Amino acid sequence: MTASITIRLASAADIPALAALKLHCFRDTFGPTGFAIPYPPADLAVFEADSYGEPTVARELADSTHRTWVAQDGDGALVAYVHIGPSKLPHPEREEGDGELYQLYLRREVQGAGLGKQLLDLALEELTSWRRPIWIGVWQGNLKAQHVYAGRGFEIVGEYKFAVGDWRDEEFIMRRK
């Protein structure tokens, strides 16, 4: 399936489609058909608007310290993305200039064909060129993601609470030196 998929840096022209993809992937992963986290509706609505709205995506793409790659299918639809930037995780050993993998998501229909590995490789190569260590925040219930990152040399070095409105997700902080 990845033969007809192109990976490229996202551009301003991608803002509406990327915002929609980010929202879709978040809901698909953490909503009723995924991990089914029971977020209070009001908290979820604010979080989704703040995190995946077009103004936020536009700011991320305009920020020279961030990089977002998108995977586009043969019909031009965005089907996956990876977003990196300066680490903001609350860990005492994190330093200014450390990089973080913020998000790596694929639509379900393109999962399992190696696209996630390609995007992860691309992101880690770029982050490694910035400096080490590289940080990732991972929801504690996402064992598959933890396993993938552990296989790439990441280890759990802390915990924090990720805010979705007033709701707090329990997250692990993972680091690769």
Image: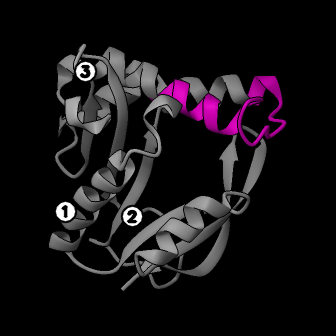
Locate residue 14, reporting x and y percent. Answer: 25, 21
In this rendering, the answer to whether 53 lies above or below 116 is above
Residue at image location 59% in from the left, 27% down from the top: 48
Q: What residue sits right under mark 2 in the picture?
A: 87
Q: Can residue 90 be seen in this snapshot?
A: no
Amino acid type, label 1: Glu
Q: Earlier in the sequence, mark 3 or mark 1?
A: 3
In this rendering, the answer to whether 90 lies above or below 138 is below
Q: In the structure shown, which secondary structural element does the residue marked by tag 2 occupy?
A: loop
Residue 133 picture quarter: bottom left
**Which quadrant holds the N terminus?**
top left
**Which quadrant holds the C terminus?**
bottom left
Is residue 106 toward the left or the right of residue 81 in the image?
Answer: right
Q: What residue sits right under mark 3 in the picture?
A: 14
Q: Mark 3: give few (<14), some (14-19) or many (20+) Cα within 10 Å.
A: some
Is residue 1 toward the left or the right of residue 67 in the image?
Answer: right
Comparing 137 with 59, the one in front is: 137
Residue at image location 26% in from the left, 71% down from the top: 97
Locate residue 61, reporting x and y percent. Answer: 24, 35
Q: Earlier in the sequence, mark 2 or mark 1?
A: 2
Q: Earlier in the sequence, mark 2 or mark 3?
A: 3
Q: What residue sits right under mark 1 in the picture?
A: 126
Residue 167 is a magenta residue = no
Mark nearer the viewer, 2 or 1: 1
Q: Mark 2: give few (<14), some (14-19) or many (20+) Cα within 10 Å.
A: many
Amino acid type, label 2: Ser
* Marks 2,1: beta carbons within 8 A: no
Is residue 113 toward the left or the right of residue 165 in the image?
Answer: left
Tell me where the magenta segment starts and ends, as one range. Answer: 22-43
